[in-house]
Amino acid sequence: MNALQSRVRARWGIVALVVVAILGAIVFALDRFVLSVSPLLGPGLAVVLLVLVVVYVQALYRSWGYRLDDDALELERGVITSVETAVPYVRVQHVDTQRGPLDRLFGLGRVVVYTAGSRGADVTIPGLEPNQARELRNRLRDLAIESEPEDAV
Amino acid sequence: MKLHPLSAVTQSLQRGLVAASMAFVLTGVGRVAAPDLLGSFGLVAGLFVLLFVVGVAYGVAYYYRFDYTLTPDTFDVDSGVFGRQEREIPYRRIQNVDVTESILHRVVGVAIIEIETAGGSGTEATLNFVAADEASRLQREIRGRKTRTGDGDTTEADAETSERGTTDAAAGPAETRHTDPEAAADRLSRQGDLEPETTLFELGSAELLVLALTSFQLASIAFLLFGFPIVEDLVVGLFARLTGIESPVDALTGTPDLAVLVGLLAVAFAAVTVWAVSSVVTFLQYYGFTLGRQGEDLVYERGLLQRYSGSIPTDKIQTLTIRENVLMRALGYAGFTVETAGYSPGQSDQGPQSAIPLADRERTLSLARELEPFDELSFTRSPRRARRRYAVRYTLVVLVLTALTAGLSAAVSGFELWYLPLALLVAVPPAAHLKWKHRGYCVGDDHFLVRDGFWNQTTRIVPYYRLQTVIRRRTIFQRRLNLAHLTADTATASLLGRTDATAYDIEADAAEDLYNLNRERLQASLHGRQ
């Protein structure tokens, strides 16, 4: 299994940090104007959540892996629920590379693989280097074309 | 070709009324903004007429700007008044052609046609509406041309239509594949006597009754929710007159405890009503159900008031689902539905198409085997520790419910029956057992089968060559018990409340094996056809 780029942790962490900060601020404001238990309630919650976020992001990063097998793209991820997905190349409809603003900031990119299936109709591999993402996309495209049963030898 | 001229009339009237109703909104807003200017009745009436005319004009323009054509390879629809849309649908990409006639349509002799392909996010072409015989002509023509263009052309870009194994599965449709479409077309000159080449199944009146009495339709809950307030006064008045108890509502809900008991009674009453409404709806929907085979397509017709006819291409069937609810099982009946990739996730009203709504269980299985020749059903159950998992889960639900009512009783004085939900604990062991007992999977030579559900048991039959992705998942609790879920996903629309072919809580090792096995069998079936 190939691991993701390690800086994807920072990218996930930043998103979580913003959420934690907002939650902390809401609790702080609630305490200030309504509850008045202790001014430390909001910051305390934020610190606890922050620790959880660090642990979770680290665990998520460790759980992530992808591999190009003979017949299928294999993905493995998930902390609480671990999910393994096999996407046979012959079922790939199209492949995207995507780079959001945050991705670009960290020099990352993602590959999205679409199938016609109802569940997991699109699988995303985040945290790749832009070149790596492009190569993976091209490789998947070639594999999808090769595996077309009518054209295979 | 144009739509039926009457559609111009109804559509423009409809659009006219919608546009005209905006007059009230506009004047309502205007009255707040400038009360002196916009107060007069004349203005409202003027605006109403003006908007009505605009709406009618748009409807008429839409009719004249709407055009459909049957070309040799594609079905073309050009539409749009201002923004033009020109759509070409290749025949061999068409998954379903459905014809709907409501009771009013049938009086006038017209029908709505809907054409579905695997792509997109909705119905690809809707002809609302054409003459009934034109509808059956289109249905017939599209079917015929599909067969003609389908022959000798096997290269298909979309994955789900291309892989028909060379196994026995292909033998069925291949035999009827070369039927002369023109000969079939001649027999179909009118919608009224649309006679399929071979009738596979007809729903008998006894079966229809059983189906009606054993079905549950979600729509009937909505009916109850919106319908009851309308008839409430009538029902309460009738109750008072019959029993002589005046204004029972206030007396019965005098104390919170009484209210809870009355509430439970009301739930029981509602359940009976829902069942009755369901029966009527199902009866109307499936009245006169027939299923036939015509070339490569299955064609079905059903409905008493609203006549519905559709086609299911047998070479595009993704999965088969055998459905038997607890009542049907007790009476020895079952039904099955087929899923194609045509319908989009949003179209929950369409749902998977019932190939056989209800028949004797053996008959259902043999008919299903005609479409997908699956092996004997011998299911492997989940290990016993899965049952413990369900028991724990249900117990937790009961305890949370009890905690909620306990909290409520602390807040509301006079509410003492907080321990009532604890009675449900008695039901936990049998519930867990039944859930466990009705789950299982079966690995066939050409199909992967999973079974789930006690109240509504579904047996899903997935041919290996239809697999899209294979998913194995384990939650933190499952890992502790060494269990896993395994999903064999196909290209069917995931409708609300419908689950995929998932084997629940099976041994983690077995799931690992199945994960690899499904992939191997898919490759084998793909290469087997070379």
Image (cartoon, coloured by chain):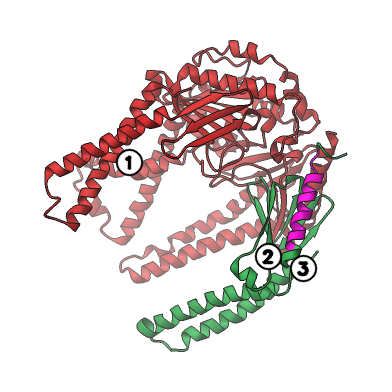
Chain colours: A green, B red
**Mark 2 is on which residue type?**
Gly
The residue sitting at 56% across, 61% down in the picture is B395
Query: Which residues, given as a range, are shown in magenta?
Result: A133-149
- Seen as rendered, the residue at the extreme right is A153
Residue B389 on the magenta segment = no
Query: Is the Cβ of the residue at disc 1 closer than 8 Å to that at disc 2?
Result: no
B25 with respect to B462 (left or right): left
- How far apart marks 2 and 3 lie (CA) works out to 14 Å
CA neighbours of label 1 inside 10 A, class few (<14), some (14 to 19), many (20+): few
The quarter of the image holding the C terminus of chain B is: top right
Count of numbered labels shown in the rendering: 3
Query: Is the Cβ of the residue at disc 2 closer than 8 Å to that at disc 3?
Result: no
Q: Element under label 2?
A: strand
**Image quarter of residue B243:** top left
To which residue does mark 2 refer? Answer: A109
Q: Element under label 3?
A: loop
CA neighbours of label 2 inside 10 A, class few (<14), some (14 to 19), many (20+): many
The residue sitting at 75% across, 23% down in the picture is B174
To which residue does mark 3 refer? Answer: A3
The answer for which chain carries disc 1 is B
Of B35 and B277, the residue lying toward us? B35
**Mark 3 is on which residue type?**
Ala
